[in-house]
Each structure stands twice: as C-alpha cells, then as structure tokens.
Image: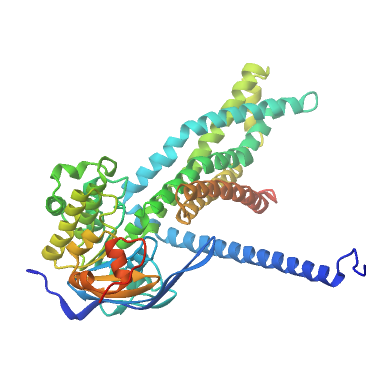
Amino acid sequence: MGTSRFPDPLLVLDSLGEITLRILRRVHGAILDGLASVGGVLVMCGQIMALFPKALSQPESVIKEAMRLGVASIPLVFVTSLFVGAVAAVSAKYQFRDMVPLKYLGTSVSKLVLLELGPVLTGLVMSGRIGSSIAAQIATMKEKEEVDAMSVLDLQPLRYLAAPRVLVGMAAMPVLTTISCFLAVVGAWGVCVIGLGVTSYTFLSGTRLFYSPYDVFVCEIKALVFGLLISLMGYYHGSQSAGGAKGVGEATMKSVVSSSVMILLFDFLIAFLLLRQSPT
Amino acid sequence: MPGVQIDPNDEIIQLRHLRKSFWTTEGEQQVLQDVSLNIHRGETMVIIGGSGGGKSVILKHMIGLLQPDGGEVVVDGKVISTPDYFDAATIRRKMGMLFQMGALFDSMSVGENIAFALREHNPGIPEESVEEIIARLLGMINLNPAFATKMPSELSGGMKKRVSLARTLAVEPEIVLYDEPTTGLDPITADVINDLIIDTQHQFNVTSVVVTHDMVSAFKVADRIAMLYQGHIIFVGTPDQVRTTHNPYVQQFVRGQRKLEAVPA
C-alpha cells in the first residue's frame, strides 16, 4: 500500500546515534565521578595522615581502637591462617609427588606464605572484619547526625573519627600479618608431620633454605599498604553513606568490595616494583 | 522579658536570598527558592512550616553544615556561606545546635558527651572544673548528677534531648539552634523542653532559632515566628500577629486544616 515494511534507514541511524550519545554521556559521567572519588580519597588520605600526630597525642582513643579492631581480630587470623597453611602444604605435597624432593616443601610453603598468602589473605579477611566495621560505625554515626554534631562543636571528624582508625589499621595489619604468616607455617608444619609423612626436620630445614629477610620486608610493606587501604576505604564509604539502614548496608558492602579490589591491585603493583628483580 | 535584651537593630543572623537544591532520584528538588530572614540578637525566632519543607536545611546553612547554591548567610557580620573552613570554625565556636534525635555520641557516657568539646577546646582545664560544669549543667536540665556515668542508650528520648542541650551549653554559645526539639515527645516532656529553651534564653542570654511544626511549642517559646512555605519565607511576626493574620497559608498551618480556606478580614 505504498508503505515500506522496513523502517526508514535515516530514522534508524538517528536512533542509533541518540543511543550511542546517551551511552557516551553515561560513560563520561561515570569516569568523571570515578576521578572525583579518587581525588577525594587522596585528599582525605593526606588530611588524615597530617592528623596522625594529634591522634597520637591522645593515645586512649588509639588504644581503644587498637583493642577493638586489632586485638579482637587475632582469633579470626588464628583460625584462617592455620587452615590456609595446612591447605598450602597439602596442595604443594600433591604437586611435588615424584618430581620435587620433599625438602623443598617447607621452602615453597614459607615463600608462598610470606610473599603472597600471608599479607593478601589477612588483607582480604581484615577488609571484611576491620573495613566493614569502620564503614558501618561511621555510616551509623552519620545517619544519627553524630558526625554533624561533632562538626558543630568545632571538632574535626577527620581528627577524632578517621585518624585513630586509619592509624590503627596501618599499625595492626603488619602485626596481624606477622602472626598470620607464623601460624600458616605452623599449620603447614603440623599437617606435614601428622598427615603427610614428612619429618619435622625435613620441613623445617626447607623453611630455612633460601630464606631472605627481604621477603619479610616485602610482606610487611604489603601489610602496611593494605592496612591503609582497608581503613581508608572503610572511613571513606562510611562518611559518604546516605539513606538510612540501606545506606549503612551499601557503605559496608562498598567498603569491602573496594578494599578487596584495591588489595589485589596494590598486591600486583608492590610485587612488580619490589620483586621484579632479585635483591642484590 | 526579664533578663533578655533583644535589640531589633542588631541582626546577629542574616539570610539573604538563600537558594538550595538537592538531587534526588526524581531529579533536582529546589528546597529553598529565595529565603531572606533577619534574626535579632537575644530573641527566640521560631521557623514553622510543613515537614520536608526545608526548615532544617535553613538551620544547617546557619551553622555552615550546608553551603547555599545562591545567596548569603551572615552571622555576626561575617559571611559564612563560603567554603572557607576557618571562618566557619570561628563562627561555630559561637553557635550550638540541638539535633532532632539528640545526636549524642553513643560510645561516650553522658558526662563525657557534655565535657567532650570543653576538654578538647581547653586542654589545660582542671578536671575539678569540668566535673563542676557537668554537675551544674545536669542540674540545669533537671537531671541528677549520677546521670553523668550513664550511657546514651540508657536514656529516654526526652532525656537525650536535654543532655544534648547541656552539651551545647557547655561551650557557652551565643546562638543556639534547635532542630525539632519537641518532635516525638509526649506533651508533658515537650513542655519541659519548651521551658528549657526559655530558661536557656534567660540564663545565658542566647539568641535562639527553633525549627518546629509543633504550634504549642512555637507559641510558647517564640518572640517572633517565621513561616516557610514552598521555599520562601511568607510571613514573619510575633505570636499574636500569627494568631490574627489573614494570611490563609499561615492560618491553614496554625489551625492544622487540610484545605486552604480564605480568612475573613
């Protein structure tokens, strides 16, 4: 009847152009938001670090946070590390069979634990323990207008809420990671001696083989950076929350997700920077 | 009023053509369209208006918690509606705010809440003086000194608001802002809070700004009442002027009528 079954190509192109433009606008907006967030976090990080001396001048609040965030995390680190070490030993023994002498079992497990499993696993577990705790607490305080009340009393929230928590996060992670590494090796040693038929001497002499203090240095650097990331993400997402209980839940979730992703990203960056070449 | 000196020529807070919008899921919402209001030193100004109309937003502008999209906030001759933190910090030492739910710090006892800012702003203050101030302020809000060791979770809603007022007064502000001070309280407890607002004005000679939609409270504590309607201040007057005005929007609000009715002259 004179009307085509097919749509006008110009109209189709027009629609496609409109959709593409909308997508580009969204992407552009998301990139700008992302950059603004990164900028905001970096500025906040600098401000918080500048407030460390003031936070340390009142050690009671730092000690209180250290007990709540650090010491209370030890049982969790204890359980996870023992089992992770044990699993690493079982997996290594499985892969070594008939190919690699068992004296290298202790070497591979201790290297793996020090350079990777210890800091990363402790970091991921602590992002769920410390990061989520900080985010939920700050978001709830914001929801109940406690953060505003602090500002109104001319008391900087960054000084009283952020600095002690970030300081404790940075101090606690190296300690927790050291405990974690030790327990993971103990877990591996235990399973080797009890269940894998490897003698205690073979395992322990292996752990001493190729031992380098540089590995401990890399491990502690990672732990320090992860501690900063976890506590910073916790505070940042908590302070940005809005919208009642839903907002508190979202802040907690975002804190865990973002710190987990950043732990993996910075794990690679630190490894690339510090382990690319063998130490002289 | 005895003990209170209101100087109509001394405007301690000036709001000049204030504009503020917020982005919501439904798009931009202009809460304050053009708000201008002058508050005299020593008076109690009550701002009334519907829920969600922007009354608390006005208070947060006065104390620098929010920055306006347009217009100016002048406190004691200084423009504080700029991102300059130093200015805001200087002004905040003169101001205190009572939040709707009290906003007490949950991890601190009542005494620690009251003395927190006092201790931080005066590092060398003797502990005996702090204890004395806590006891005096608890007495002023009609609470036993033994309450100093209680935690906020052990207090009722009315007690939390009273402790919040004591915390505000500990730093001896010249201006006190009250955000819905009687909301959620029974009429008798609400009256206790109203009396405290009046006592505070008399004893400390402070300027008070009270945001409320409780007309009983507004008539009791106000020297002047301003009405916020659709982002504008549409009426400012004494409680008697509010009672007798022919402004239909004010009368609708005061009488609590659902429909707008013409008020006979």
Where B213 sits versus A14, above or below?
A: above
Viewer-closest of B53 and A24: B53
Residue at image point 56% right, 35% down: A181
Where A277 sits versus A105, above or below?
A: below
For residue A31, what is the image quadrant?
A: bottom right
Q: In this view, does A22 lie to the left or right of B177?
A: right
Coloring basis for residues:
rainbow
Q: Where is residue A22 in the image (x, y as percent from the top left)?
A: 70, 66
Q: Position of residue A72 (x, y in %)?
A: 43, 35
Residue A101 visible (yes or no): no
Residue at image point 51% right, 52% down: A233
Viewer-closest of A109 and B102: B102
For residue B121, what is the image quadrant?
A: bottom left
Q: Where is residue B145 in the image (x, y as percent from the top left)?
A: 13, 45
Residue A233 visible (yes or no): yes
Q: Position of residue B262 (x, y in %)?
A: 32, 72
